[in-house]
Image (tube, rainbow, N blue to C red):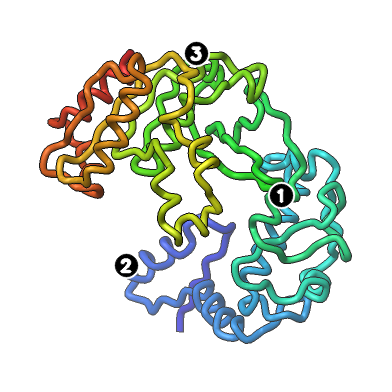
Amino acid sequence: MRVIAIDGPAGSGKSTVSRRLAERLQLRYLDTGAMYRALTCQPRPSAPDSSGIRTEEYMNERAAYDMARYRCNTPTCQAWAHYGGRGIEFRFTSFNQFMSCLGVRPKHSVLDRIDNDGHYEPGNVRWTDYSTSMRNQSPRPSKSGFKGVRKSYNLWQAHIKIRGKRKFLGNFAGDASFLGKGRIVCSGHSAGGHLTAMMLATDWPGVWPEFPQRLLSGGVTISGLFDLEPLTRAEFIRNDLRIDPVLARALSPAFLPWRNDVPLIRAVGAEESAEFHRQSTLMGAHWPLACERELIDVPDCNHLSVCDAFADARSELFAATRALLSR
């Protein structure tokens, strides 16, 4: 019996050459490399790793272990500057030790260091929820020049702190210096319309001295709420919001000064209740210079379907918003 054995470095084409040679010489072909890999894979799912723990049963825990070690030991990691780059070390010697300290990862939890300036080591790690982990991060310097705005990878992120809790506002691309150029247009529907008008009623330099007086370039409200006093008449809303007539008036744009010299576009669905029409009409009477454009009465729309006109290129609302954005 003739036997031809072909060996060589990995990736050199051993299997391809052997298979073609066997076909030409009409010999039986055995790929021993594939055979050994198949035999190895068979017992692998039931075999523990070097730590004594069955890794396939703890995939999430292993992923957290590997990622933490990678951030601390790999300078090419994008997050290196916040981990290994500032001296954070990964001091677990094995996955077994890691699991002994932490146990199985609870659902919806992440790996977190208790002392964010400390190392990944026994006694300083825990499983916790994402929000707690985010609040535990070290403050990172803002290169935007604006408080609460920093760059994350290729996007700028905006956050605000309310009652000690950090709230995410959104992402935006480009140079953060545009914040000082009055290029922000706010828009909102219903309660969001209330927030939009409140943005125009805010004294921005009073919020932060480095904000320009004209932070915004305009606002668009769709079926907005501008007079909150009617809400105090509904007991379930009044109790939930803890709002009385005095507080309602203080939070109603329809009774507040116009502090941002920019236009406000108002729209309401033609099929909406008289109260929504009254709200937008009241806003126009209170801020006549901001609301120079007539109230847009969107035909055949109710309180929900009126939002569709915002994305309809044929609608008056779409055209007005596009003109505002082009200013």
Across and down, in percent, residue 80 comes to: 72, 41
Residue 159 falls in image quadrant: top right
Q: In the rendered image of this protein, does residue 227 appear above or below residue 294?
A: below
Q: CA distance from mark 3 to mark 2?
A: 75 Å
Mark positioned earlier in the residue sequence (3 or 2) = 2
The total number of labels drawn is 3
Mark positioned earlier in the residue sequence (1 or 2) = 2
Give the residue at mark 1.
135
For the point 66% across and 23% down, the residue is 208
Instruction: Look at the numbered disc 1 and give the secondary structure of its residue.
Output: helix
Cβ–Cβ below 8 Å for labels 1 and 3? Answer: no
Work out whether residue 35 or residue 59 is closer to the camera in this orientation and state it: 59
Work out whether residue 139 or residue 87 is closer to the camera in this orientation and state it: 139
Across and down, in percent, residue 271 comes to: 15, 45
Give the residue at mark 2.
24
Location of the C terminus (image quadrant): top left
For the point 58% across and 21% down, the residue is 204
The nearer-to-camera label among 1 and 2 is 1
Q: Residues within 10 Å of mark 1 (few under 14, many from 20)?
A: few
Instruction: Look at the numbered disc 3 and give the secondary structure of its residue.
Output: helix
Q: Residues within 10 Å of mark 2 (few under 14, many from 20)?
A: few
Q: In the rendered image of this protein, does residue 209 appear above or below residue 89?
A: above
Give the residue at mark 3.
181
Across and down, in percent, residue 253 comes to: 44, 31
Across and down, in percent, residue 101 comes to: 83, 72
Indicate the amino acid at tag 3: Lys
Mark positioned earlier in the residue sequence (1 or 3) = 1
Q: CA distance from mark 1 to mark 2?
A: 68 Å
Indicate the amino acid at tag 1: Arg
